[in-house]
Each structure stands twice: as structure tokens, then as C-alpha cells.
Image (cartoon, grey):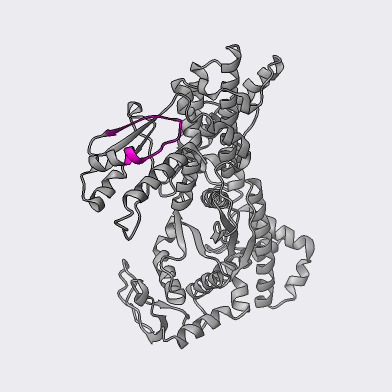
């Protein structure tokens, strides 16, 4: 148990004693915070305020009673009451430094939560259409999703990573036709590409791949529908292989690739519509014109409509097209219902910000089907603006209309891509400059953080080369870590588990990257003002211990981000 937890436990015990005769419906919980002003101590707590009303006393009286009745750990030097009833707690010199031993003992599991009752999560992310390479926008969602998966796993969730393949729709027909035209072109046949065709050299690559396995004559003997259907299957497979490779390059794998086509083939989409009909949630009606569009000749058509407005949506939604086939929306809710039927306690989806208008209709549908509100949880990722030296980056010839993620990774490296994508809230658009991402300076966040880890390794290697005998951690006098910079470093190391808890609860893995930058800055300040080697041995051993603990926490945090912690730069 950390010193902070010991102090919390001692105060909580006192709170429960003071309220023994009151028996409130909900017991107030002690929460320690770090004061913004160093002179106010190491911790502060405002528990006296919520207790004041329950005990019918003023907060300062309650705070006085709390301090009189609480037995604090020996590491607490003094306590005092400030303002209307805040309790400030000051520790003895080096009071928290013993926790460094705890960090090193836990190693790679420091900050993690182990439980036998893991909360199951289906985390769906990327899910890019299987019609082309991944672009940088997909890459941001991929990195955020993978980091969130690592974060939730570290905090006791059982995470299942899933990619939904939209392989049943008009875009697949367009893909098949685009590839078929290129296959003809490779045979010397003159073609004319329609505006709807997918551009880019990757389509030609797919055409070559297909022709390497099957002759052009074979496809020529098929009728048009069967020809395009077979080419569509082969093109989707080729694209998914390309996407999987793009993901592998940035260190991302999935537990499952779920095909939309299987929902239709298994009858699950039709079964879902039948269930909704039986539940009285479908009726035949008409819809008003789309909002925001003026359509002078709009004619309302009778359709099968799902009563999503009864569950929070702004308009009821059609489940079948005029030809009787299921809408994309029908397949989508069938997919989410399937995830729920598989027993996951939480469903989390990561979508592009342009899908924001789709959230309410899916959540309304799931509420109708399961009774659960705000499921799935949807995180919306803003777009990435790619620049070079501040200027917009030109489109990729290979991809045709966008910059392929693989091109960016090849130029700046996996670590730069992953870390930089995590330095902003997902609600913010991100300007990613290729030259800045390659810079070996403190202006480049990934370089700055990785250099902090490499700097520690350099000091430890130098100590070894100079014959310094590093003693066992339990023989180190941690009270010698009394400098302001050492104390600041210890505080941020001890804040790591709480940061992970907040990040997991709020689904905000960007907090990990922010933490590593703060930790790196704190480490660099310590290094510049506190000599490690060449000082008195006991002090040197204490400072080496602090560096080793810092190295461990940096490595743990970077690991969650999927970024390396290099020993040399």
C-alpha cells in the first residue's frame, strides 16, 4: 500500500467513526490531492466540507475533530487547517521516497490492476473500408484504439480488439469494376475509367495480383455479374491483406476481423428485422425530406421504419431499401446486437468525426434492443492535417486521393507516428508535420521523451563502466532524496497509477503521452541540478535508485503507447 493510500485509509477510518451515529445513505469518500502551492504541504483533503452538513458543525470544527482522531503514518510530519476547513498534510523529508522500492519491485506491472473479475470490452476501431490503403486519418484512429486497448487491459479490463469489414455494399461493386477495368488495361485493352472508379496505383497492383493467380481468359468467360462478384471477393481479400500489413508496421493486431457479409449470409440481419417487427418496433410510414437539404421535387415513399425516436433518435430509420434489401443501418445494428449477444459488458467504438451524426441512431437502436443507454460508447476522432515544414503535403500517387499511412511510417518511423498521434485530445484536429516528427530536438515530443530514457541508461552504463557497485535497493537511504527536483520527480512517479485510472475511466489514452512529456521534463530538470555520479556514495546510490524507478515508469508508459524506450539515441 502506498503512503497516499495509507493516509487515505487513516482519514477514511476517522470519517466512518464520526458518522457512526449519523449513518448517511452514502458514505463520503476521502480524496487526497496535490496542493498547487508547495508551501501548503504534500497533500490536501477537503473531506471536512461534506461532513459539516451531516454533523451540523462548521467545516473547521469538523477538520479539527478529524485531526484529533486520526492516527497518521509515521511519514507524516505535520498537518494544519487552512481556509474554511481544508486539511493540509506535510510529509517528513523523503517521506514518499520509499515508494521507489515499490515501483522497482512491481516493475512492468507498476500502475496495473490485476483482477479475477475482468470487465469485458469489445473495442472496435479502424474498420476502414476494404477498398484501398489506410490513410493517415485511419492511422490516428488505429493508434488511439490500440493505446486505449493497452490502457484498459492494464487497468483490469478484458479487451477484445475487433475490426469490422464493410464488405457488403455499393463500394465493393465500385471496387470490383475498378479492378476489372485495370485488368483489361493490362491486357492492352483501351478503357475509360468512370468518375466513380477508385484511382491510385494500388488498384493496378491488385489487378496484377489477381491475374498472377487466374488467367484473364477465365474471367472473360464468366457473365458480368459473376465476374464482378468474384473479382470483388479477390479485391477485398487483397486490400485487407494490405491493410493488415499497414497495421502490422505500426504494431497493431486484432483479435478478430468481423465481416459484414457474414451477417447477411447467416440471416442475422433479417432475423433482427423480424425480431423488431415482433416487438412492435417497426411500422410502414414515410420520412420527411433530409434536414439541411432543399429538394423541390421530394416525394415521400412508404418504407419499413424502425421506431428509434421512441428511444432518443430525432427521426425513425428505414431498415429496407425500395428493392427489399436491408439498409446499411440494418446491418450495422445487427452487428452491434451481435457484439452484445456475445456477452461483452462494454462496447466501445472509435469512429471518424464525420460519423458524429450516426451516434444517436445506433445508440437509440441498441437501447431498444438491450435496454442499455449510451451503448456503444463512441469516441470520435478528428482528422489529421499532414504538412511538411508547415505546408500542406501533396497527395500520394500510390493511394490516388490521399496520403497512405504506410508512406508516412516509412518516412518518419513507427514511434514518431504513434507518439505524435497521441499528443492531442481526439476532439482536436491534429497538424502532423513530417519534418518536425523527424527532428532530433526537444521540440519533437517523441524524441524528447525517448531521450529522457536514453539519458538514464547512459548514466547507469557510465556508473557500471566506472566500477560503481550499485547496492541492493533495500540498503538505499531514500531520505537523502530531499532536493526540490528529486521530490518533484518522486511525486510524478507516484501519480502514474492515478493518471492511468483517470485515463481509463475517461477513455483518454492521450493522458499517457502528456504524462511522459511531463515526466521527461521533470527528469531533465533533476539531471541538470542534481549530480548523480561522483558525489558521496550514499547520496549517489539514492539518486541512482531514483533514476532506475524513473526509467521503469517511462518504459511502462511508452509500452502502453506502443512506443519503444531506447537505451541509446
Q: Residue 422: horizontal and vertical position, in percent?
A: 50, 43
Image quadrant where one finds the C terminus = top right
- Residue 552 is left or right of residue 74, and the answer is right
Q: Residue at x 23, y 35 (%)?
A: 83
Q: Residue 520: horizontal and vertical position, in percent?
A: 51, 29
Task: Look at the picture and state if 545 lies above or below 60.
Answer: above
Task: Look at the picture and state if 22 lies above or below 230.
Answer: above
Q: Residue 104: horizontal and vertical position, in percent?
A: 61, 34
Q: Indicate the quadrant where residue 380 lies.
A: bottom left
Check residue 548 for magenta coloring. no
Query: In the rendered picture of this protein, how many numbered marks are placed on residues?
Result: 0
413 or 539, nearer to the observer: 539
Whether residue 517 is visible, yes or no, is no
Whether residue 554 is visible, yes or no, is yes
Magenta extent: 66-81
400 or 434, nearer to the observer: 434
- Residue 410 is left or right of residue 95, and the answer is right
Task: Look at the picture and state if 288 lies above or below 152.
Answer: below
Q: Residue 377: horizontal and vertical position, in percent?
A: 45, 61
Task: Look at the picture and state if 135 lies above or below 172.
Answer: above
- Residue 321 is left or right of residue 30, and the answer is right
Q: Residue at x 55, y 31 (%)?
A: 100
- Residue 259 is left or right of residue 52, and the answer is right
211 or 122, nearer to the observer: 122
Amino acid at each position: 500500500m502506498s503512503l497516499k493510500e495509507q493516509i487515505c485509509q487513516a482519514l477514511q477510518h476517522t470519517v466512518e467513526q464520526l458518522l457512526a451515529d449519523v449513518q448517511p445513505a452514502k458514505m463520503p469518500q476521502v480524496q487526497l490531492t496535490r496542493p498547487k502551492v508547495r508551501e501548503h504541504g504534500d497533500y490536501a483533503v477537503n473531506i471536512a466540507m461534506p461532513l459539516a452538513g451531516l454533523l451540523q458543525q462548521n467545516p473547521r470544527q469538523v477538520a479539527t475533530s478529524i485531526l484529533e482522531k486520526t492516527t497518521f503514518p509515521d511519514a507524516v510530519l505535520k498537518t494544519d487547517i487552512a481556509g474554511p476547513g481544508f486539511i493540509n498534510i506535510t510529509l517528513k523529508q523523503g517521506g514518499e521516497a520509499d515508494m521507489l522500492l515499490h515501483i522497482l519491485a512491481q516493475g512492468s506491472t507498476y500502475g496495473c490492476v490485476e483482477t479475477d473479475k475482468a470487465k469485458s470490452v469489445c473495442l472496435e476501431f479502424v474498420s476502414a473500408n476494404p477498398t484501398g490503403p489506410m490513410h493517415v486519418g485511419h492511422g490516428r484512429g488505429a493508434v488511439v484504439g490500440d493505446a486505449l486497448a493497452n490502457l484498459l487491459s492494464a487497468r483490469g479490463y478484458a479487451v477484445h480488439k475487433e475490426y469490422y469489414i464493410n464488405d457488403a455494399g455499393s463500394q465493393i461493386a465500385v471496387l470490383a469494376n475498378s479492378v476489372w477495368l485495370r485488368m483489361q488495361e493490362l491486357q492492352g485493352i483501351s478503357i475509360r475509367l468512370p468518375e466513380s472508379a477508385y484511382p491510385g496505383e494500388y488498384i493496378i497492383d491488385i489487378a496484377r495480383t489477381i491475374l498472377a493467380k487466374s488467367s484473364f481468359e477465365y474471367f472473360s468467360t464468366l457473365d458480368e455479374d459473376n465476374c464482378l462478384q468474384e473479382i470483388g471477393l479477390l479485391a477485398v481479400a487483397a486490400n485487407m491483406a494490405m491493410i493488415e500489413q499497414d497495421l502490422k508496421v505500426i504494431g497493431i493486431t486484432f483479435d478478430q476481423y468481423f465481416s459484414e457479409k457474414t451477417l447477411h449470409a447467416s440471416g442475422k440481419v433479417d432475423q433482427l428485422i423480424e425480431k423488431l417487427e415482433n416487438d412492435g418496433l417497426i411500422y410502414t410510414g414515410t420520412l420527411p425530406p433530409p434536414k439541411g437539404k432543399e429538394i423541390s421535387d421530394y416525394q415521400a415513399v412508404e418504407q419499413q421504419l424502425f421506431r428509434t425516436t421512441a428511444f432518443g433518435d430525432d427521426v425513425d430509420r428505414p431498415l429496407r431499401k425500395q428493392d427489399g434489401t436491408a439498409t446499411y443501418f440494418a446491418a450495422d445494428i445487427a452487428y452491434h446486437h451481435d457484439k452484445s449477444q456475445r456477452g461483452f459488458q462494454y462496447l466501445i467504438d472509435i469512429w471518424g468525426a464525420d460519423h458524429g451524426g450516426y451516434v444517436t441512431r445506433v445508440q437509440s437502436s441498441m437501447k431498444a434492443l438491450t435496454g442499455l443507454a449510451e451503448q456503444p460508447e463512441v469516441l470520435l476522432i478528428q482528422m489529421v492535417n499532414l504538412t511538411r515544414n508547415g505546408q500542406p503535403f501533396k497527395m500520394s500517387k500510390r493511394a490516388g486521393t490521399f496520403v497512405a499511412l504506410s508512406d508516412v511510417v516509412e518516412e518518419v518511423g513507427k514511434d514518431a507516428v504513434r507518439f505524435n498521434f497521441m499528443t492531442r485530445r481526439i476532439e482536436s484536429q491534429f497538424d502532423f508535420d513530417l519534418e518536425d516528427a523527424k527532428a532530433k530536438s526537444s521540440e519533437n515530443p517523441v524524441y524528447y521523451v525517448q531521450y529522457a530514457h536514453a539519458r538514464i541508461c547512459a548514466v547507469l552504463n557510465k556508473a557500471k563502466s566506472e566500477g560503481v557497485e550499485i547496492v541492493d535497493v533495500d540498503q538505499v537511504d531514500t531520505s537523502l532524496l530531499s532536493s526540490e527536483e528529486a521530490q518533484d520527480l518522486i511525486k510524478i512517479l507516484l501519480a502514474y497509477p492515478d493518471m492511468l485510472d483517470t485515463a481509463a475511466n475517461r477513455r483518454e489514452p492521450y493522458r499517457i503521452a502528456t504524462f511522459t512529456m511531463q515526466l521527461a521534463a521533470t527528469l531533465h530538470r533533476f539531471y541538470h541540478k542534481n549530480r548523480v555520479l561522483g558525489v558521496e556514495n550514499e547520496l549517489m546510490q539514492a539518486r541512482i535508485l531514483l533514476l532506475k524507478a524513473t526509467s521503469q515508469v517511462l518504459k511502462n508508459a511508452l509500452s502502453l503507447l506502443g512506443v519503444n524506450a531506447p537505451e541509446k539515441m
